[in-house]
Image (cartoon, rainbow, N blue to C red):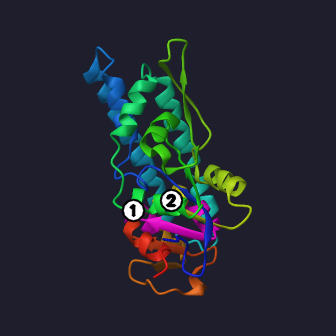
């Protein structure tokens, strides 16, 4: 079956990984796997929980600080940029405390094989590949090896961060950072979007917003509460594909977010009837 948006074929699909392709975030499983190599597991996990709680509280506080203001001059780019110091400090704590030290590539591949994908992911991506649509992953995840193992032949390229390994092929706990913010994702997206046709981007969180809004077709999957708050606050135009399957050329332009509940909704939208 020929995949491609009705009367609007795409040449490339670029997708976020955690929460978009996967059912759940894969960062915690990474740390839990690393904990198995520690003699002081309880203390290790307690320290990790402190980092998680700090990160979540900082994210929530920053969102509420912006939402609480009614400044009409506020811009989405400035809002998203305000999260960068939080991301940087979070990564500094993770690397400084070496939470991921000791993980092997075998560990990461095993974690990847165990990742649960959202319903419909494999079917949609295989169908797109059969129609010569390029599939790429653009993720702020910490392990390319994990993503490669999880995706297998379902994608052609992966843009993400890397764990650093020592001479014994064990992670040092350092992370080579490439993609950590919404602006990073936008930069990668602009460099790697299709040069010969339209590009669809799909993500699930505010870190994906700039890429979504820049794409020829930008899709937000799921019901991320913060993402919906931000859409309302900045008055971003949306169309629910889940509730509106009829082709409408007006919705297929950059700057509008298409909302879906699942990849099955995207399949209905992509497959010509």
Residue 206, which numbered label?
Answer: 2
Instruction: Determine the residue positioned at 53% across, 77% down.
Output: 235
Are the residues tagged 2 and 1 within 8 Å (C-beta)? yes
For the point 42% across and 19% down, which residue is it? Answer: 102
Is 221 in the magenta?
A: yes
Residue, x 48% and y 59% (percent of image)?
125
Q: Residue 250, relative to residue 256: is it above or below?
A: below
Range of residues picked out in magenta: 209-229
Rendered position, 253 above or below 112: below
Residue 249 appears left or right of 26:
right
Q: Mark number for residue 151?
A: none
**SS for dot 2:** helix
Mark 2 neighbour density, 10 Å: few (under 14) some (14–19) many (20 or more): many
Q: Position of residue 4 (x, y in %)?
A: 55, 72
Residue drawn at 48 percent across, 63 percent down? 127
Q: Residue under circle 1?
A: 224
> Is residue 157 placed above or below 64 in the rendered structure?
above
Q: Pick out the residue farthest to the left.
A: 42
Residue 95 belongs to magenta span: no
Lower sequence index among marks 2 and 1: 2
Residue 264 horizontal/vertical position (percent) = 38, 68
């Amino acid at each position: 079956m020929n995949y491609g948006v009705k009367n609007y074929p795409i040449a490339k699909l670029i997708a976020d990984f955690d929460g978009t392709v996967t059912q759940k975030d894969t960062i915690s499983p990474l740390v839990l796997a690393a904990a198995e190599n520690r003699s002081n597991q309880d203390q290790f996990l307690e320290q990790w929980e402190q980092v998680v709680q700090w990160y979540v509280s900082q994210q929530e506080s920053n969102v509420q600080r912006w939402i609480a203001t009614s400044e009409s001059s506020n811009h989405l780019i400035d809002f998203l940029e305000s999260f960068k110091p939080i991301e940087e400090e979070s990564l500094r704590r993770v690397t400084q405390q070496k939470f991921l030290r000791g993980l092997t590539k075998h560990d990461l591949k095993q974690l990847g094989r165990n990742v649960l994908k959202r319903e419909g992911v494999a079917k949609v991506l295989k169908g797109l590949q059969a129609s010569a649509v390029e599939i790429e992953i653009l993720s702020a995840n910490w392990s390319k090896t994990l993503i490669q193992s999880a995706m297998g032949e379902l994608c052609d390229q992966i843009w993400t961060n890397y764990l650093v390994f020592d001479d014994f092929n064990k992670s040092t706990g350092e992370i080579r950072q490439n993609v950590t913010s919404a602006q990073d994702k936008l930069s990668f997206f602009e460099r790697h979007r299709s040069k010969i046709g339209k590009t669809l981007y799909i993500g699930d969180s505010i870190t994906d917003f700039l890429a979504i809004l820049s794409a020829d077709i930008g899709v937000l999957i799921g019901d991320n509460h913060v993402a919906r708050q931000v859409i309302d606050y900045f008055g971003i135009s949306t169309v629910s594909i889940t509730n509106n399957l009829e082709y409408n050329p007006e919705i297929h332009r950059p700057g509008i977010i298409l909302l879906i509940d699942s990849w099955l909704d995207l399949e209905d939208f992509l497959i010509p009837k």
